[in-house]
Image (cartoon, coloured by chain):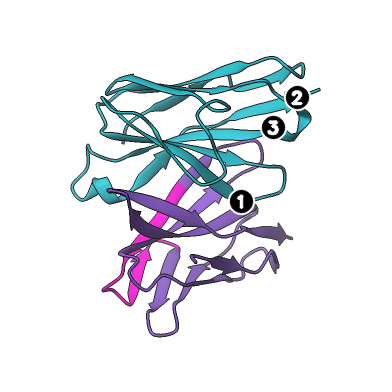
Amino acid sequence: GEDVEQSLFLSVREGDSSVINCTYTDSSSTYLYWYKQEPGAGLQLLTYIFSNMDMKQDQRLTVLLNKKDKHLSLRIADTQTGDSAIYFCAETLFSGGYNKLIFGAGTRLAVHP
Amino acid sequence: SAVISQKPSRDICQRGTSLTIQCQVDSQVTMMFWYRQQPGQSLTLIATANQGSEATYESGFVIDKFPISRPNLTFSTLTVSNMSPEDSSIYLCSVEGDWAPGGKNIQYFGAGTRLSVL
């Protein structure tokens, strides 16, 4: 079945880079996503990557996709305290005529001075 | 992007009662989704609500417990029926981004409804 796995916790120093990793199982996923959830808030779409791409950069965010290994990573450059949140990786499963998102458990990023 | 509003933002309810959660979008969208996020957990899809047809429920979720309405292209409701403490969760609606090029592959989320059942 579909499964998305992430490490649960990451702690970094302010100003350093953060790398959050994710593995997924469905090789037919057309899009892969990163969402951010701040305390008490909903999910904010951070970025996404189409499955035929290896890399996508958007300001401080870099997404790398290794389709062979079904590995996705999110790099946040110059991490700030405002980046402290839970980051969810999600893959797409097309089923029953619609795109269903399968989420990982989320990685809690803690940024310390 | 569109604005997705959920009401209520939070509620505390007694067991055995029901709560209806509303999701309003300021653009017409084809697909709306309802997710549950149990405490400390990830998101699980409850059902998909397509305007003009019955909602499609995922395994483990049934219409009697989570009835859904989708009366038009900008609005949906999810009811959590006969609640128990195990229903304490965040309930989130999402929509496909019909308004953006390629947006039908992207889901955008509301802020969620935080439900506590005593």
Q: Is residue A92 left or right of residue A35?
A: left
In which quadrant will I find the N terminus of chain B? top left
Q: Which chain is cyan?
A: B
Camera-nearest residue between B3 and A61: B3
Residue annotated with mark 3: B87
Q: Which chain is purple?
A: A
- Dot 3 falls on a residue whose secondary structure is helix
Residue annotated with mark 2: B117
Residue annotated with mark 1: B42
Range of magenta residues: A45-60
Farthest residue in the left direction? B101
Position of residue B78 relative to residue A2, above or below, is above
Q: Amino acid at mark 3?
A: Asp
Q: Amino acid at mark 1?
A: Ser
Position of residue A41 relative to residue A20, above or below, is above
The residue carrying pointer 2 sits among few (fewer than 14), some (14 to 19) or many (20 or more) residues within 10 Å by Cα, namely: some
Camera-nearest residue between B110 and A55: B110
Q: Position of residue B51 (x, y in %)?
A: 28, 27
Q: Position of residue A80 (x, y in %)?
A: 61, 57
Q: Are marks 2 and 3 in contact (CB under 8 Å)?
A: yes
The chain that hosts pointer 1 is B
